Amino acid sequence: MKLYANPYDIERADCAFYFDSFGEYEDRYAGIHKKFQVEEYEIEFIEGTESELALFSAASVCQASLAEFYETLGLLAEHELPAFYFLMAHNGYNMKEARSMARDQIVGEQTAEDAAQEQLDDMLAELDISERKKVEIAMYFDVERKAQDMQMNGEITEFDFDGRTFTIDRN
């Protein structure tokens, strides 16, 4: 991911720089600060994946939170990123709160309808009736309506991250 440190002091625009890691940011910042005493920068996203952009935006990355952002990306597993994103973008948690909660979330790469179908399949599997009866019951079950109900009553929330659809279990 390529970021850009843009000085708030417009007279010091020549002190702007690109960087790809927090270590590179620290090195460039230290050199410029020592030579020109420029301290405050706006951090801008320049290039990266769709998920990196979504995380950068949801985390509201600024100069003060840059180290935490890089640290968090290094600590979270790939499968935890959708929950981390959701908690910040849709629930308003800060990075520290979202990072500590991300591992405890039940997130699936599925639509709300897929989640409703999965719930129906689980319920039918528990019934002690013939397969034929299970199929008959399933035929009359409105999965789309169940998905809407699950979302409206807060059981699940469907969201997009990295070009994919996820649901998060809110129970």
Image (cartoon, rainbow, N blue to C red):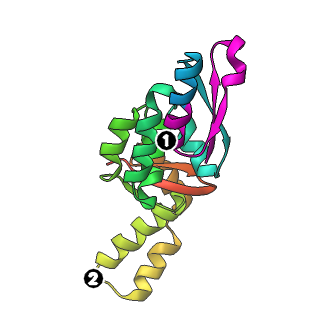
Find the residue positioned furthest to the front: 35
Residue at 29% x, 76% y: name it.
Answer: 126
Q: Kindly identify which numbered label has been placed on residue 22.
A: 1
Residue type at mark 2 is Asp
Task: Say whether residue 90 is visible.
Answer: no
Task: Say whether residue 164 is visible.
Answer: yes
Q: Kindly identify which numbered label has been placed on residue 34.
A: none
Measuring from the top left, give residue 46's x and y in whole percent.
69, 40
Residue at 60% x, 58% y: name it.
Answer: 164
Residue 20 covered by magenta stretch: yes
Q: Is residue 89 above or below residue 123?
A: above
Measuring from the top left, give residue 66's x and y in whole percent.
47, 34
Measuring from the top left, give residue 61's x and y in whole percent.
52, 32
Q: CA distance from mark 2 to mark 1?
A: 58 Å
Q: Which-is-in-front pick, marks 2 and 1?
A: 1
Residue at 40% x, 87% y: name it.
Answer: 131
- For the residue pair 93 and 60, the one nearer the viewer reads as 60
The residue labelled by disc 2 is: 128
Label 1's element?
A: helix
Residue 100 covered by magenta stretch: no
Answer few, some or many: residues within 10 Å of disc 2's Cα (few below 14, many 20 plus, some between 14 and 19): few
- For the residue pair 34 and 142, the one nearer the viewer reads as 34
Measuring from the top left, give residue 130's x and y in whole percent.
36, 88
- For the residue pair 70 and 123, the one nearer the viewer reads as 70
Q: Is residue 34 above or below residue 67?
A: above
- Of labels 2 and 1, earlier in sequence is 1
Label 2's element?
A: loop
Range drawn in magenta: 1-28
Q: Is residue 148 above or below residue 127?
A: above
Marks 2,1: beta carbons within 8 A:
no
Q: Quadrant of residue 119?
A: bottom left
Residue at 45% x, 40% y: name it.
Answer: 69
